[in-house]
Image: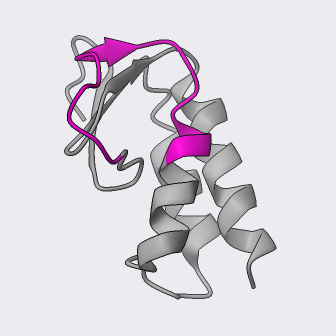
Amino acid sequence: MEEQTHTLLCGDLFTQGGADLPPITESDILGPSEAFRRGMDYFSHTTRARQMVERLATTNPATLACMHGSAWRGDGAGLLRALADALEAEE
């Protein structure tokens, strides 16, 4: 977490496939990310995913800096919790 700009360096949590993505967006990245992840099944299958994602959400990031795809600007805590919901729905 880069505290001055409230940017969470979140690696592969919201990976989006493709090469023609804007550097930063406020549009949906969860839908494309989940479609990409389900096709590759590259996430851990821990039963503690919600707890780990919730710890990240409590940092209240304003920007989620993804390793692959657009960085996302907005309610980062809300989007992280939406990711936790999606992961939990698969259990």
- The residue drawn where x is 24% and y is 22% is 3
Looking at the image, residue 30 sits to the left or right of residue 62; the answer is right
Q: Using the image as rendered, state which of residue 57 and residue 63 is in the foreground.
A: 63
Q: Quadrant of the C terminus?
A: bottom right
| Residue 51 image point, x, y percent | 60, 67
| Residue 80 image point, x, y percent | 57, 43
Display coloring: one colour
Q: Using the image as rendered, state which of residue 37 and residue 81 is in the foreground.
A: 37
- Image: magenta residue range: 17-32
- The residue drawn where x is 51% and y is 34% is 29
Looking at the image, residue 62 sits to the left or right of residue 31; the answer is left
The rendered magenta stretch, by its main secondary structure, is classed as loop
Q: Quadrant of the N terminus?
A: top left
Magenta span contains residue 4: no
- The residue drawn where x is 30% and y is 15% is 24
Q: Using the image as rendered, state which of residue 56 and residue 10 is in the foreground.
A: 10
Q: Using the image as rendered, state which of residue 4 and residue 50 is in the foreground.
A: 50
- The residue drawn where x is 54% and y is 17% is 27
Instruction: Classify residue 71 by image quadrant.
Output: top left
* Up/down of 21 relative to 88, above or below: above
